[in-house]
Image (cartoon, rainbow, N blue to C red):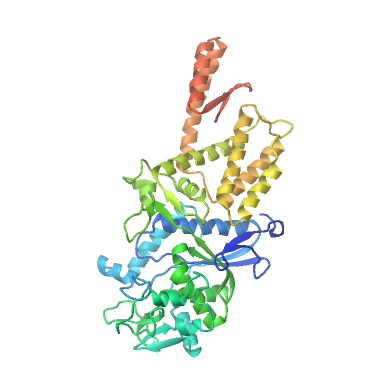
């Protein structure tokens, strides 16, 4: 763990559209809220990229000394099929299709979500509240908005009055959209809605008689609006104003814009000082989405396979692939990209394994570990720039490989220090882990290589230099160098 005083962290704030120095509300504490999944279907990799990004952010904040309360919700009611407050609740619809109780759907896909976060080695949040567990808090917020004359009730449903709110506030402060443009680009209601304005959004919806998920309220038997739940839960666990609010880029409008409006209308704040958004994951150049079917499920990558991929991959290999792009950049997933990422990840793990077992120390280390570690921290302090961090880690990997063939020197103290830093960056901050597959691969490779090295040593003892050199050269052609500087030969990957 590093002291927060020695690291000036900068975060890109979607509110201001620029990087800002991070100054938490409380000196040693950070409150962070991240919008979690709507659990009506299996989580896809695009979702997991968002949660991976905020896992690294959470890990790094903890690493540099902050005490973080990380709240990530589960949406288990209120998320309708579109953003115009029309259509079925997604969970109710899935329950009807699968002939299940809605809470069976919730349980089934929450379990799937948690299983995949474990495969990605994501830390659990401090609190993981559900929308259905906070109906009372949402009703109280609606009452507050009605009392502040920024909401209205029609036929048992309650709506937020965006036009009235915008007279004294900026609806569009986050997405940089102008309400005049929104009005111009919206079709008229044609009497088909209870809303005063097309831009207004539901705080409470009166349920139809056939609707399964409904609760009693002062206005009707119904259910809360999707945007309201996050305001209620973030306010309950983090207060009227907290440090970081995160989510996917697709949530910036309307979801996060509506959250800011609700928070300003209730508490006079933008909810969070820093709004952060992770960009999307595309698949072979096109948007990855459950609704379009252009997606790969995590289980297809980890175990069952996909016709789009040549093989399966470990969670850490896929995570390493994701972290080689900045969280605010669009990242395109392809078979070739995953294969290349797996090779790179294995090189990092192989170097760590070499460092853990290395014994042939020198008196000095001709690698500036302090300077190197500072560049790693500088990368993370620059809006959590994991691609630059990984590039720096590969510099250390090159040095370790040079040490094994006698082209660089490493002292015992230097080895301990370098290993400590690499473990911090690779395992603690990025949350990568040695997979069972990589451990088995390394163990089997060690056994095979020991046999090859023994045969080569026998050839050298017998002065059969043709065979000895042939083994060395063939291994070199396949990326494995032999180190003959020691009494017993060793090997490393180029």
Q: Residue at x 55, y 68 (%)?
A: 15
Image coordinates of residue 438 in percent, x first then y, are 47, 39
The picture quadrant where one finds residue 111 is bottom left
The picture quadrant where one finds residue 39 is bottom left
Residue 429 visible to an observer of this rendering = yes
Left or right: 138 as drawn, with respect to 294:
right
Q: Residue at x 54, y 65 (%)?
A: 14
Q: Is residue 3 above or below residue 129?
A: above
Image coordinates of residue 159 in percent, x first then y, are 41, 83
Left or right: 65 as drawn, with respect to 162:
right
Between residues 126 and 59, which one lies in front from this camera angle? 59
Residue 115 visible to an observer of this rendering = no
Image coordinates of residue 75 in percent, x first then y, are 41, 69
In the rendered image, the residue lying farthest to the top is 463
Between residues 281 and 366, which one lies in front from this camera angle? 281
Q: Is residue 459 above or below residue 479?
A: above
Left or right: 146 as drawn, with respect to 429:
left
């Amino acid at each position: 763990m590093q002291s927060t005083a020695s690291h000036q962290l900068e975060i890109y704030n979607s509110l201001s559209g620029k990087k800002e120095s991070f100054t938490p509300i409380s000196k040693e504490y950070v409150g962070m809220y991240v919008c979690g999944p709507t659990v009506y279907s299996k989580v896809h990799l695009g979702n997991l990229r968002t949660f991976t990004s905020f896992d690294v952010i959470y890990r790094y904040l903890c690493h540099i000394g902050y005490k973080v309360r990380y709240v990530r919700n589960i949406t288990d009611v209120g998320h309708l099929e579109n953003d115009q407050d029309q259509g079925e609740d997604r969970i109710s619809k899935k329950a009807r299709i699968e002939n299940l109780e809605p809470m069976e759907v919730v349980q089934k896909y929450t379990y799937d979500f948690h299983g995949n976060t474990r495969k990605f080695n994501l830390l659990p949040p401090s609190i993981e509240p559900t929308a259905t567990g906070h109906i009372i808090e949402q009703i109280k917020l609606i009452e507050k908005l009605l009392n502040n004359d920024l909401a209205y009730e029609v036929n048992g449903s309650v709506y937020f009055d965006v036009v009235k709110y915008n007279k004294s506030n900026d609806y569009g402060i986050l997405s940089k959209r102008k309400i005049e443009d929104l009005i111009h680009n919206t079709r008229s209601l044609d009497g088909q809605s209870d809303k005063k304005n097309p831009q207004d959004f539901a705080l409470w919806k009166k349920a139809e008689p056939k609707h399964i998920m409904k609760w009693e309220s002062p206005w009707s038997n119904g259910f809360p609006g999707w945007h309201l739940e996050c305001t209620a839960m973030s306010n309950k666990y983090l207060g009227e104003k907290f440090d970081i609010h995160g989510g996917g880029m697709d949530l910036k409008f309307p979801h996060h814009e509506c959250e800011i409006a609700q928070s300003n209308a209730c508490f006079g704040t933008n909810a969070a000082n820093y709004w952060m958004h992770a960009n999307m994951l595309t698949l072979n150049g096109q948007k990855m989405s459950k609704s379009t079917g252009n997606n790969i499920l995590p289980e297809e990558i980890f175990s069952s396979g996909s016709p789009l991929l040549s093989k399966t991959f470990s969670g850490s290999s896929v995570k390493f692939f994701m972290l080689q792009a900045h969280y605010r950049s669009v990242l395109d997933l392809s078979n070739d990209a995953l294969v290349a990422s797996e090779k790179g990840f294995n090189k990092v793990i192989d170097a760590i394994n070499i460092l853990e077992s290395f014994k042939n120390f020198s008196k000095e280390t001709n690698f500036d570990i302090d300077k190197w570690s500072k560049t790693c921290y500088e990368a993370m302090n620059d809006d959590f720039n994991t691609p630059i961090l990984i590039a720096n880690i590969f510099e250390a990997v090159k040095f370790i490989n040079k040490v094994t063939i006698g082209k660089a020197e490493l002292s015992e103290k230097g080895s301990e220090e370098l290993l400590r830093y690499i473990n911090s960056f690779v395992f603690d901050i990025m949350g990568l882990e040695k997979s069972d597959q990589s451990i088995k691969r390394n163990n089997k490779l060690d056994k095979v290589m020991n046999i090859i090295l023994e045969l080569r040593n026998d050839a050298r003892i017998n002065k059969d230099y043709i065979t000895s050199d042939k083994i060395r050269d063939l291994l070199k052609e396949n990326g494995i160098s032999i180190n003959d500087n020691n009494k017993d030969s060793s090997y490393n990957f180029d």
